[in-house]
Image (cartoon, rainbow, N blue to C red):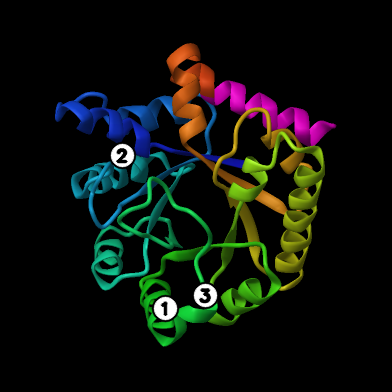
Amino acid sequence: MRLHINVDHVATLRNARQTPYPDPVEAARICLEAGAHGITAHLREDRRHIVDDDVRRLRDFLSPTGAAVFNLEMAAAAEMVAIARRTRPDVVTLVPERREERTTEGGLDVIAGGESLGAHVRALLDAGIKVSLFIAAEEAQIEASQRLGVQQVELHTGEYAHAFHDAVARARELERLARGAAFGHRLGLEVAAGHGLTRDNVVALVRIPEVVELNIGHAVIADAVFLSLEGAVRAMSGAIDRGRLA
């Protein structure tokens, strides 16, 4: 199970005062030293948290480490694809993006993406970049992703997170994610998961054997207020271990 930490909200805190501190690159260093396997950052079109210079510096920092993966989340848009082709992250995760949303809500509609989405995926693959699509755990969306030739899908876990305190709804959402992960695995796709995951709800999710990677941001940064960033990463890793060993 690979744990990638999303450092967007470190940049959110920095941008609130327009100061150099806290630095998402320094946060990335602490996360890796605490046991994270990779770093995720979302370069939004409105640059509300991560900015272009952060992407460049994260790439420069992560390149020498070798073992750590740099996953760049972004909209399926020409500007973003061009930035990714210049920066060359290890992975690009294409996500839906709306200016008015607080955070990414729902999965990318791969079916509706059509030729435009396909062209963006091909441009990234041609540059030697691994491509992941952030999608709902629906067979039609998973099949459409596989047809585009991507190597990975990341299943949107927001509904599961929202349903966590309702036992019936939680079980239903967990089963839906398990079916989607198994289906994606059968199609030869690597399966990741993310959105709204916490130390509480991640334990049951990681029991799905086909899920091999998690992307977690907000909960870790929030936990860091009380536990330190190193402590928050270690606490999340411990929760994952408890789920995997159960």
Specify the label residue 110 is tagged with.
Answer: 3
Q: Name the N-terminal-most of marks 1 and 2.
A: 2
Q: Residue at x 59, y 38 (%)?
A: 197
Q: Position of residue 21 (x, y in %)?
A: 21, 24
Q: Which residue is mark 1?
A: 117
State how far apart marks 2 and 3 are (Cα): 32 Å
Task: Name the image quarter holding residue 45.
Answer: bottom left
- Residue ID at (23%, 49%): 47
Residue 111: give x, y in percent of width and height: 54, 80
Residue 240 among those drawn in magenta = yes
Circle nearer the N terminus (1, 3): 3
Of all residues shown, which one is farthest toward the right?
246
| Residue depicted at 76% across the width and 43% down the height | 170
Instruction: Rate crowding at label 1 as few (under 14), some (14 to 19) or many (20 or more) other CA atoms within 10 Å.
Output: some
Image quarter of residue 10? top left
In three-dimensional space, the C-alpha distance between marks 1 and 3, rounded to whole angstroms, equals 7 Å
- Residue 7 lies, with reference to residue 102, above or below; the image says above
The kind of residue tagged 2 is Phe
Q: Is residue 121 magenta?
A: no
Residue 16 numbered tag: none
